[in-house]
Amino acid sequence: MTTSELIALAGFAGAAIAMLLVTQTKERVAWPAWLVPAGAAILVAAGTGVAVAKDGLFGFWEVVVASPWGVQIWLDRLASTTAAFFLLQNRARAIGMKSEVWVLVVVFTGSIGLLAMLARTVHLERRKAA
């Protein structure tokens, strides 16, 4: 197995485990929950930084358009990010965040910006509740 395949499988396993753990949580966690999406954003940003350093800012495009699967994964990513932003932006607005700023962050950084927005939203919600 290549390093890229191992990283992809580890990422899948990590995401699956995190989602399963969240579904098993019966009560609100006492620790700062915003650290989870913030940590994920940092990991994804680091991976993106490595990819950009190696293949350039638009190095992903060759992979995306190389096959129907590449296009499908791209469209799935766009749909998922749009749906997540749609669901999150009402919570963000309710605590005073400016959606216009965050939509630009998410459009230009994808899941990195979405995870950062989620971390900020959770942080502000917890601070407001305290």
Image (tube, rainbow, N blue to C red):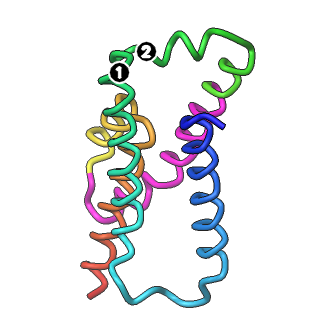
**Disc 1 element:** helix
Residue 118 placement: quadrant: bottom left
The residue positioned 53% from the left and 10% from the top of the image is 62
Q: Is residue 129 left or right of residue 37?
A: left
Q: Is residue 39 magenta?
A: no
Picture coordinates of residue 22 (x, y %)?
59, 74
Q: Is residue 94 magenta?
A: yes
- Quadrant placement of the N terminus: top right
Q: Is residue 98 left or right of residue 21?
A: left
Identify the disc placed on residue 29: none
Residue 14 placement: quadrant: bottom right
Boundaries of the magenta span: 75-97
Picture coordinates of residue 9 (x, y %)?
64, 47
**Callout 2: few (<14), some (14-19), or many (20+) C-alpha neighbours within 10 Å?**
few
Q: Is residue 59 left or right of residue 124?
A: right
Of mark 2 and mark 1, the one earlier in the sequence is 1
The residue positioned 55% from the left and 90% from the top of the image is 27
| Nearest to viewer (mark 2 / mark 1) | 1
Specify the amino acid type for callout 2.
Gly
Mark 2 touches mark 1? (CB < 8 Å):
yes
The residue positioned 35% from the left and 61% from the top of the image is 119
- The residue identified by callout 2 is 59
Picture coordinates of residue 126 (x, y %)?
32, 78
Specify the amino acid type for callout 1.
Lys
- The residue identified by callout 1 is 54
Check the image and report above or below for 105 versus 54: below
Q: CA distance from mark 2 to mark 1?
A: 8 Å
The secondary structure that dominates the magenta segment is helix
**Callout 1: few (<14), some (14-19), or many (20+) C-alpha neighbours within 10 Å?**
few
